[in-house]
Amino acid sequence: MTFVDGGHGRLRRGVDISAVLRGRRQRAGGSMVVHVLERTDGDGEPARVAVIASRRVGGAVQRNRAKRRLRELIRRLPLRHGVDLVVVARRQCVDAPFAELGTELEELCAALGVLDTSVSAEGGG
């Protein structure tokens, strides 16, 4: 499994991403939508994450910028083990202040119960 800097794995296969998107657990904010699926087979494994930006977000430069910004924010979050997370960028994600995006992502993840409360976000985990 490939890990991003925060210790979270990456969701790469389309079938895995589709399974998360078909799940019923999601929360929407102004700049993103967060989808979550609990893995029954991976309680001890780190969270796996995918970031999606469709053409609605903008051209290739805007889509890549939105994904880079979201990946960095996700890297800083202490995610629980055993969950798959798909973050779908919205157009507002490109121009929103970075701190606002971080607050929104953290609130959405907390509402979905995917943050590891035993580790502080500042401590790095």
Image (cartoon, helix red, strand yellow):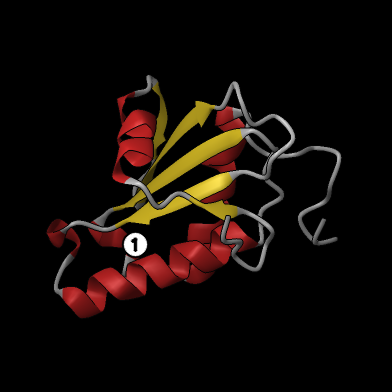
Q: Give amino acid for label 1.
A: Cys
In the displayed structure image, the side of residue 67 where residue 4 appears, left or right: right
Quadrant, the C terminus: bottom right
34 left or right, relative to 64 = right
Residue at figure coordinates x 61%, y 43% from the top left: 47
User: In the image, is 2 to the left or to the right of 5?
Assistant: left
Residue at x 66%, y 61% (from the top left corner):
76
Residue 45: horizontal and vertical position, in percent? Answer: 69, 40
Q: Which residue is drawn at 80% across and 37% down?
A: 117
> What residue is rendered at 49% in x and 64% in y?
71
Asked which quadrant contains residue 79, the reply is top right
116, above or below 57, in the image: above
| Residue 56 can be seen in this image | yes
Residue 42 place in picture, x, y as percent: 64, 31
Of all residues shown, which one is farthest toward the front? 1
- What crowding class fits label 1: few (fewer than 14 Cα within 10 Å), some (14-19), or many (20 or more)? many
| Relative horizontal placement of residue 80, taking residue 118 as reference (left or right) | left
Q: In this view, does 100 lie above or below 113?
A: below
Which residue matches tag 1?
93
- Look at the image and tell me in which quarter the N terminus lies: bottom right
Q: Position of residue 21 (x, y in %)?
A: 32, 32
Q: Note whether residue 96 is visible.
A: no
* Coordinates of residue 31 in the picture (x, y in percent): 35, 53
Element carrying mark 1: helix
Task: Say which quarter of the image contains residue 34.
Answer: top left
